[in-house]
Image: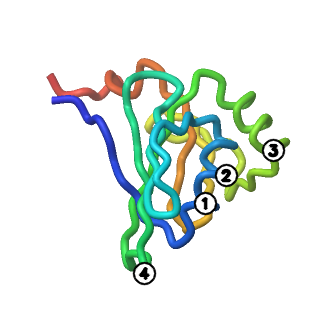
Amino acid sequence: MNLNQITISSLEVEKSVVFYRALGFNLIVNALPKYVRFECSNGDSTFSIHRVEDLPTGNKITLYFEVENLSKTVNTLKQKGIIFNTEILEQPWLWNEAHLNDPNGNHIIIYHAGENRKNPPWRVN
């Protein structure tokens, strides 16, 4: 199986569209104000956003987006006005990542793991 798509919730889908376009995603379905769908700039994955009356509470989802050059991506996004919750962090699981939130509070991690994403030194055979 291959993960194709996830859907996240939004109170204001229009604001989410502006945010995710600024991150560099391509809008492929526009059914505003209720629904939109994006494709990632690399790979075949897509994700959608649908309007809700109330956001989920408790443990929300975390979206991970991998990029080749994390420093360049973070700097470019900061120049576009995107606010990060952290600087780039070097994690003990061998990923470098920067954390932020979308307009609805969904946690986003933009990261680079390279070979360590699927093949860390401690991978189980």
| Left or right: residue 7 compared with residue 40 | left
In percent of the image, x 29 and y 35: which residue is there? Answer: 4
Instruction: Estimate the x, y position of residue 44 in percent, counting from the top left.
Output: 37, 25
Q: Which of marks 4 and 1 precedes in the sequence?
A: 1
The numbered disc on residue 54 is 4
User: Which residue is at the far right?
Assistant: 79
Tell me the amino acid under the disc marked 3.
Lys
- Mark 3 or mark 1, earlier in chain: 1
Element marked by disc 1:
helix
Q: Residue at x 46, y 33 (%)?
A: 39
Q: Residue at x 43, y 81 (%)?
A: 54
Q: Position of residue 22 (x, y in %)?
A: 69, 43
- The image's mark for residue 80 is 3
Please give the label number shown on residue 14: 1
Distance from label 3 to label 2 (Cα)? 11 Å
Label annotation for residue 18: 2
Q: Amino acid at mark 4?
A: Asp
Q: Secondary structure at mark 2?
A: helix
